[in-house]
């Protein structure tokens, strides 16, 4: 497995002004807009220095200089978009541990929204999922301390701790923000990102909970296992469940798509400048042997999950079932800042599906919309607001979509989306599925995109759309 963290080296260059000297004549270049803008920037930096020094010398109590600088950096980054942030050395190390798939804590993906800590999704088989924490829950307090005013990293630090110790979360749920306290016992969280099993004796079911360094190998192992257990003439196809998967590593999402297609573009990333565009192509070898594929998504499917669903949909390789995905279409790069200085998590590009679609603030629309039956006590609490509702999100034209249902029944017998996927693979006709787009009749075969781009090496860029995991 390859791990790659991109190091961005920033330099500043200042050109010297030139003077043309002739007999009794001195010519100086007139100020240009670029020079004027640079001068304004340096004046602003001088202002920052003046304010910093004034706080150090005159504040009622002596402040911590390092914390002042970190708070300033955090404020600068948080003004850009919801996914850019600063990680101190500890948070940077925690992030690296998380992408390796094992850490201590509660097992919930969280993000920050309007000053509150919001649950993106609980991770399967963790203290959070067993305690009934749901996607969309708001964490208002941790052990009695209000989270209002805390950074995301500070809140995560309070929720993490030694295994077998307890923490109490004040949870706000639903439109009325009904409050309740939930006591959880911390545990060693071993994220098994891929879970698989047979559905009946003719379908292989693969669930990806998030995209970490174990994901591509997990999908490959699952496919090989199914192929050894189910005779080829009996195999109806595969179900890839990406519901409530908040995302993760870009290179892992590319590898997962490559397990089901063997040519053509998978995803492209486009930065501010045209020469920053990167295109990632499939390599030969379809591990799934072209068997039919259904992908399940919902309002909690974000980022890397949307890359996978969008690529397989554009290739006409899979039928997408469920509800509209979250709509996070930006890529974050982790930029180390040197020894003990932590790292930046900076939004550096948007990503696009093979057909050139941006899902930013729009999401992936399923080919067949299937709504789950939500219990009465959860109605009104089962939807995510989506990327378009996040303050400061990157805009995507005038047409934006605001989330969708994110409920998955705990009992498979009541899971209408899973049942619809099995029926589709087995050729059972259903009357209660409403198509939002006409699925291709050749969904088992990938379509060859026109003028495929040259292959590029995927970077293992952590995608903070996955949020933080205490």
Image (spheres, grey):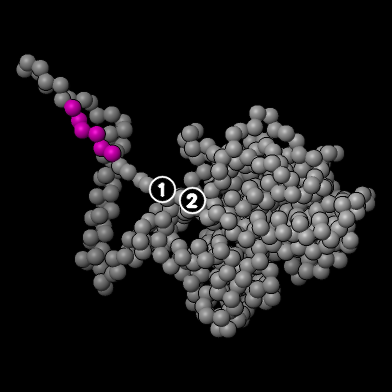
Local SS, label 2: strand
In the current view of this chain or complex, which residue is farthest to the left? 24
Disc 1 marks which residue? 8
Q: Nearer the viewer, residue 199 or 229?
A: 229
Which picture quadrant has residue 374? Answer: bottom right
Q: Position of residue 199 (x, y in %)?
A: 85, 61
Q: Kindly tell me whether residue 206 is visible in this rendering.
A: no
Q: Nearer the viewer, residue 71 or 126?
A: 126
Residue at the (33%, 61%) spot, across then down: 69
Placement of 66 over or under 29, stated as above or below: below
Disc 2 marks which residue? 333
Start-end of magenta stretch: 13-18
Q: Nearer the viewer, residue 182 or 166?
A: 166
Residue at the (86%, 66%) spot, across then down: 413
Quarter placement of the N terminus: bottom right
Mark 1 crowd level (few <14, some 14–19, many ≥20, 10 Å Cα): few
Local SS, label 1: loop
Relative to 151, 450 lies left or right: right
Residue 459 covered by magenta stretch: no
CA gap, disc 2 and disc 1: 9 Å
Relative to 187, 145 lies left or right: left
**Is most of the magenta stretch helix, strand or loop?**
loop
Q: Position of residue 359 (x, y in %)?
A: 63, 44
Task: Give yes or no for contact between labels 2 and 1 (Cβ–Cβ under 8 Å).
Answer: yes
Looking at the image, tell me whether mark 2 or mark 1 is earlier in sequence order: 1
Residue at the (61%, 80%) spot, across then down: 184
Mark 2 crowd level (few <14, some 14–19, many ≥20, 10 Å Cα): many
């Amino acid at each position: 497995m390859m791990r790659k963290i991109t190091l961005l080296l920033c330099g500043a260059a200042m050109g010297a002004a030139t003077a043309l000297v002739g007999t009794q004549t001195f010519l100086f270049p007139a100020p240009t807009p670029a020079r004027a803008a640079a001068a304004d920037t340096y004046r602003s930096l001088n202002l920052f220095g003046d304010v910093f020094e004034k706080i150090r010398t005159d504040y009622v109590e002596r402040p911590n200089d390092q914390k002042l600088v970190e708070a300033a950096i955090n404020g600068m980054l948080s003004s850009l978009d919801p996914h850019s942030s600063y990680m101190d050395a500890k948070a940077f190390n925690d992030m690296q541990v998380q992408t390796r798939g094992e850490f201590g804590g509660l097992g919930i993906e969280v993000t920050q929204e309007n000053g509150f800590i919001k649950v993106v999704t609980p991770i399967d088989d963790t203290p959070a999922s067993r305690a009934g924490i749901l996607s969309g829950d708001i964490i208002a307090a941790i052990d009695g301390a209000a989270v209002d005013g805390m950074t995301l990293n500070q809140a995560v630090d309070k929720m993490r701790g030694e295994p077998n110790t307890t923490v109490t979360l004040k949870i706000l749920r639903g439109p009325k923000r009904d409050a309740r306290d939930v006591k959880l016992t911390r545990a060693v969280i071993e994220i098994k990102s891929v879970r698989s099993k047979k559905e009946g004796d003719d379908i292989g079911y693969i669930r990806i909970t998030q995209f970490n360094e174990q994901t591509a190998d997990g999908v490959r192992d699952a496919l090989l296992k199914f192929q050894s257990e189910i005779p080829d003439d009996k195999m109806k196809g595969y179900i890839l469940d990406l519901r409530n998967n908040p995302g993760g590593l870009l290179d892992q999402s590319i590898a997962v798509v490559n397990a089901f297609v063997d040519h053509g573009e998978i995803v492209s990333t486009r930065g501010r400048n045209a020469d920053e565009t990167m295109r990632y192509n499939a390599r030969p070898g379809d591990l799934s042997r072209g068997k039919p594929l259904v992908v399940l998504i919902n309002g909690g499917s974000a980022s890397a999950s949307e890359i996978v669903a969008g690529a397989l949909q554009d290739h006409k390789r899979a039928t997408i079932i469920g509800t509209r995905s979250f709509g996070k279409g930006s890529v974050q790069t982790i930029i180390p800042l040197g020894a003990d200085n932590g790292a930046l998590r900076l939004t550096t590009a948007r990503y696009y599906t093979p057909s050139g679609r941006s899902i930013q603030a729009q999401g992936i629309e399923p080919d067949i919309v299937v709504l789950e039956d939500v219990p009465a006590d959860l109605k009104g609490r089962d939807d995510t607001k989506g990327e378009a509702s996040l303050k400061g999100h990157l805009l995507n034209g005038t047409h934006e979509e605001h989330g969708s249902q994110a409920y998955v029944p705990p009992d498979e017998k009541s899971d209408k989306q899973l049942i619809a996927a099995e029926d589709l693979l087995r050729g059972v006709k259903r009357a209660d599925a409403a198509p939002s787009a006409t699925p291709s009749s050749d969904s088992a075969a990938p379509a060859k995109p026109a003028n495929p781009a040259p292959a590029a090496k995927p970077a293992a860029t952590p995608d903070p759309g996955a949020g933080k995991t205490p």
